[in-house]
Image (tube, helix red, strand yellow):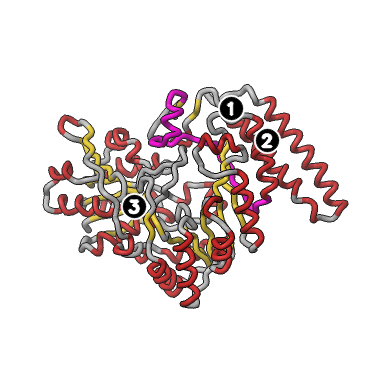
Amino acid sequence: MDLLLTHGYFLHEDPKELQIMKPYAPLGLLYLSSHLKAKGYAVEVFDTTFRTREELSAVLETHSPSVLGIYANLMTRGSVVQIIQKAKAVGWLVVLGGPEPSNYIPEYLQAGADAIVIGEGEITLEEILESHLRGDGETFGRIQGLAIRGAGGAVQQTAARPLIPNLDAQPWPDREAIDLGRYIDIWRSHHGAGSASLITARGCAYHCRWCSHSVYGKTHRRRKPEAVVDEIEWLRQRYTPDMLWIADDVFTIHHAWLFKYAEEMKRRGLALPFECITRADRLNEKAADALAELQCFRVWIGSESGSQRILDAMERGVTVEQVQRAIRLCKARGIQTGMFLMWGYAGEELSDIEATVEHVKQADADVFLATVAYPIKGTEYYAEMSGSVVAPGSWAAGSDRDIKLRGRHSRRYYQFADQWLKNEVALGKLSAKDYVQATADAELLRQRIHEARRGLALAHDEVEA
């Protein structure tokens, strides 16, 4: 074995996901695996999702040490640090990649990593393997897109690596390297329909200040519609999923591409329900028609706030009305909608929270998910808030989600905002109920709204740090 690929996510350690049970395969690792196998390297994937730390440790201990490639994101930092330490203790060369390590190069190198891939990983990892296998680790400093320890222990970062220009020249993800059927079966047993994921593009060219672009930069590269349909046709024949998750950052960004894709699916008689993410400004009548024809059953939209002032501060590039219109377009075609929302962005006031509550009520989306804004290192938002950042006590045990901002409202404050929002939306949905039941439910919801708003007022002066 020349390379072992793994990641730091263990499903059994995630109480929230154990309730939700909607896992997806690690596509990034599977793309690396297929690329490197096509170049003649012996690659194995240890998918930690359904495995244990003890099983991974046993593999590291019993195999002859070679190169261990670990995918890391901000949610798996602590787990990845543990894997690094175990691997180094038994002689592996450890290479990290993914969206987080390039933002914390000194910390991950100090934790024991030998090299950190910055940006897209296929070609960089290929050159690392080539150098390692010929016993020439000294050449790492000449490999583009890499950070290592240089002379005297100083961090050395090489020149940026150009992105892969032609995604269609890349092999599909190496799904055969893992038990993809188990992912689909878990979905089917918990939700009645098995789901599989794929991407049709890499990157997002938009400039939201809080969003990380550490892997692909602010770029967008598309695969040919025919190539995507080929992959879907193979997925359906090989694994028979009931639906798909198209994991692009913005699926409907290119309307001409979308229409060609829809035509190709129709030409081959293919139809498989799916959900995707888009931006409100990249959805019009024709695009919505195409989604409906393709059997899209849910569209997720980054709404973030109902306050145009906050959206402009985020540099979202969309308006509140565009979000409302996009949801109306989907609902008119029987497509469910989901909204992503964000509390606590810099400068947010009570009036902005009120605007968000009203916005979500009017939109009447099928589902909405709210989080408290957190600055991700490497983003413009992090740079803006750096003077207020209070990092978690232990870097290795925390994540950017644990960062606190001096002077910002407490998490309890935003919990009350959540309660207010949920109950206001529920109150707005009562009109279709029996009058007597609706009246009783409305009274209870109004009481809860009053309690939430009162709690919000009481917690107003509580700060996070």
Q: Is residue 427 left or right of residue 289?
A: right
Is residue 407 visible from the viewing direction of this image?
yes
Element carrying mark 2: helix
Label annotation for residue 325: none
Vertical side of 416 occupied by 133: above or below = below
Q: Earlier in the sequence, mark 1 or mark 3?
A: 3
Say which of 434 and 192 sits in front: 434
User: Is residue 116 magenta-colored?
Assistant: no
Of circles 1 and 3, which is in front?
1
Rendered location of residue 313, percent (x, y): 52, 34
Front in this rendered view, residue 143 or 302: 302
Quarter in which the N terminus is drawn: bottom left
Q: Amino acid at mark 1?
A: His
Using the image, tell me which numbered label, if any, was put on residue 409: 1
| Helix, strand or loop status at disc 1 | loop
**Residue 332 quadrant:** bottom right
The residue shown at (14%, 45%) is 139
| Residue at mark 2 | 354
Q: Position of residue 408 (x, y in %)?
A: 55, 26
Span shown in magenta: 364-388
**Coordinates of residue 145 in the picture (x, y in percent):** 25, 45
Mark positioned earlier in the residue sequence (2 or 1): 2
- The residue wearing badge 3 is 6
Q: Which residue corresponds to the image point at 72% horizontal and 42% vertical from the top-left? A: 424
Which of the marked residues, 2 or 3, is nearer the chain's N terminus? 3
Q: Percent x, y for residue 339?
A: 59, 49
Q: Which amino acid does the dot numbered 3 rest on?
A: Thr
Q: CA distance from mark 2 to mark 1?
A: 16 Å
Q: For residue 380, what is the image quadrant?
A: top left
